[in-house]
Amino acid sequence: MRLPDDANETERFSPVWIAILFVVVIVVLVLWLNKDNLTGEKTKKPLDIAAENSVEQEQTAMDSTLSPEDFDFWEKYPETTPEPVVETTPEPVKEDPATDGKHTKIIGKDGEEEWIRIIEDLPKHNYDFTKLVKQAELMKYMEDGKEVSFVGVDLSKYQEYVDFSKLKKAGIDFCMLRVGARGYGTGQLVLDPYFQENIKRASDAGLEIGVYFFSQAITVEEAEEEADMVLDYIDEYDVNYPVVFDMEYVQNDTSRVENLTGAERTEIAVAFLETIDIAGYTPMIYGKKEWLLKEIDLTQLEGYDIWLAQYEEIPDFPYQFTMWQYTNQGKVDGVSGKVDLNICFIDYSEK
């Protein structure tokens, strides 16, 4: 049997009250856990506190050991000097003397090939060698179908007796006669033994006459002596073609002029040519291409005509010349053996 008071005590601890109490506890617990959010303050966790303390200690250590200079970190990297830019001049393109038009080839007396630079200031010839015509060994220069050149031979004792009348009929216009020579060893002046006969008979045949002297002069005085000898022997004849200075080396022997310098040979040539010019004749210098380009100075002889000796189909001498000895193996009626043949590009008889 249950008493009334027992019933009231049971009601005081009924399930409803227990539930209400449980909710209150939960609310209180939640509020306590979120109190930082409610007050604006954050509760630091033990790990956060430890991290902050470590940062503060590092900052303190830095403050006590670093200076402003420590922050100038660029000094830690040394300045590098840039490599200087070296301007290089490109290698000049090497000229090919065989094709550049500025050189001409010679074969020296030693047989060696050499390319000689052409002097720009010296007058160049303007011949058109396509106009050359060879008829029966005689070279002619034609313009508009008309011959405008003259054919000649040069003669000395080596041709012995010459029939000048036959030469004239064969088409020869002029003769270059050797007056004499100076001995290449002895230095003595020698008259060509055929000269006086040759000049007389050539004149009688109606041929134009020029003369030359084989020089071995080694001084200006000797050159003037040679010129005076020539003038003495041509005085009574009509010599209207040039009076020529011919200096050469001697084949297979040593000549007097080999020890001269180019300047000395040039000075000697000028002395001879000036003497001839003063006497009223046309002075001229003779030589092979190699001699003219290598052994004398043509810049000092610019005012004198040139008689070129070059045994080629077409000469390749670059400068102005008025007479060309194109062969020493010529054959012409009136001369029994071989003879030098020449073409002259101007009519000296009209000068």
Image (cartoon, rainbow, N blue to C red):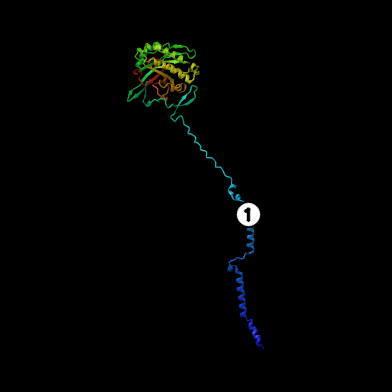
- In percent of width and height, residue 231 lies at 40, 12
Closest to the observer, 349 or 26: 26
Question: x, y percentage for residue 264?
Answer: 47, 19
- Along the line of sight, which residue is nearer the eye, 123 or 215? 123
Secondary structure beneath disc 1? helix
Q: Is residue 35 visible?
A: yes
Of residues 205 and 5, the one nearer the viewer is: 5
Q: Amino acid at mark 1?
A: Asp
Q: Residue at x 64, y 62 (%)?
A: 49
- Tell me: 151 left or right of 251: left
Neighbourhood count class around disc 1 (C-alpha, 10 Å): few under 14, some 14–19, many 20 upward = few
Residue 211 seen from this side: no
The relative height of residue 284 versus residue 39 in the rendered view (above or below) is above
| Number of marks present in the image shown | 1
Which residue is at a point 62% across and 79% down the rendered structure image?
17
Could you say where residue 257 lies in the image, as x and y percent from the top left?
Answer: 48, 17
Could you tell whether 79 is left or right of 307 in the image? right
* Residue hosting label 1: 63
Left or right: 201 as drawn, with respect to 63: left
Q: Quadrant of the C terminus?
A: top left
Is 320 or 30 nearer to us in this picture?
A: 30
Q: Residue at x 59, y 68 (%)?
A: 39
Image quarter where the N terminus lies is: bottom right
Q: Residue furthest bottom?
A: 1
Q: Against 20, is 227 above or below?
A: above
In which quarter of the view is residue 194 placed? Answer: top left
Splitting the image into 4 quarters, where does residue 287 fall? top left
Q: Residue 179's x, y, as percent? A: 42, 13
Relative vertical location of residue 238 with respect to residue 117 in this rendering, above or below: above
